[in-house]
Image (tube, rainbow, N blue to C red):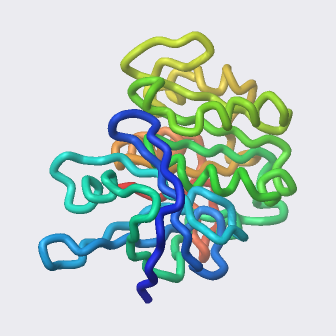
Amino acid sequence: MWHVGKVIERTDWNSRLFSLKIAVDIGPFIAGQFVKLGMEIQGKRVARAYSVVNAPGSNYIEILAVTVPDGSLSPALHLLLPGDVVEVNVPATGFLTLPELPSGKLQGRHLWMLATGTAVGPFLSMLDTAEPWQRFEQVILVYGARLVADLAYLDKLQTLARKNTQFCFLPSVTRETQSGMLHCRIPDGIASGEIERQAGITITATDSQVMLCGNPGMIHSTIELLTARGLHKNLRRAPGQITTEKYW
């Protein structure tokens, strides 16, 4: 069902990367799920899926997006200002959520969140809930982008890491070097062991749940590496350690 939402705030992280807060009632949802946004463009409704960045319980949704010059919707979204309206399709949906992970003895002790670009969105929502901190001894977020300027919500994540000893935040940029950040693609960092060295934690089938969200290349390569270590895709009929969501 389509609802009309009103933009109440926007944040520009760089010239192409932006967040929108949209006042709309989407009903109950689970951290990690997504909604579709739609706009009428040249007489047709154009819709695309965007993860909800904020935690459940707000009277708005927040989305993180990057404008693609030849995109069908993102350039129009990039022009929206507070007071403008956008259609939101509800309810939220998606299975990259913590309730989809195995529980009990199959859960493991460590939760790894591996994201590239705007795919950090669902993990931001989860981190603002109590569930990851109640279920896991340690939560590790690896957030990859080309440049430091492409890392949205960086101050928020760095502050959380300083204040919460359960949280390990590992940003990584590939097109420049920055003190305190990794300089590698996520699959390369896993293959070399650098990501685990920086985290001080090893990814194992016994102790780890790994959630992957981002570009298909990263997801495919990382799954190959993790499968070689004995981790398996998490399915409802066959619980495992790898849960994924591709972003295009």
- Which residue is at a point 62% across and 15% down the rendered structure image? 180
Q: Residue furthest front?
A: 83
Q: Is residue 79 above or below residue 101?
A: above
The mark tally for this picture is 0
The residue lying at 59 percent from left, 79 percent from top is 25
Q: In the figure, residue 102 lies in which quadrant?
A: bottom right
Q: Is residue 97 above or below residue 221?
A: below
- Splitting the image into 4 quarters, where does residue 247 fall? bottom left
x and y percent of residue 171 in the render? 57, 28
Q: Position of residue 233 (x, y in %)?
A: 54, 59
Q: Quadrant of the N terminus?
A: bottom left
In the shown orientation, is residue 178 left or right of residue 139? left
Front one among 66 and 130: 66
**x and y percentages locating residue 62 in the rendered image:** 55, 59
Quarter of the image with the C terminus is bottom left
Q: Considering only vertical position in the picture, is 110 above or below 2?
A: above
Horizontal side of residue 69 vs 130, given as left or right:
left
* Residue 113 falls left or right of residue 111: left
Q: Position of residue 40 (x, y in %)?
A: 23, 75
For the point 52% across and 71% down, the residue is 94
Which residue is drawn at the image coordinates 25% and 47% (left, top)?
68
Q: Is residue 71 left or right of residue 196?
A: left
Q: Quadrant of residue 188?
A: top left
In the rendered image, the residue lying farthest to the bottom is: 1
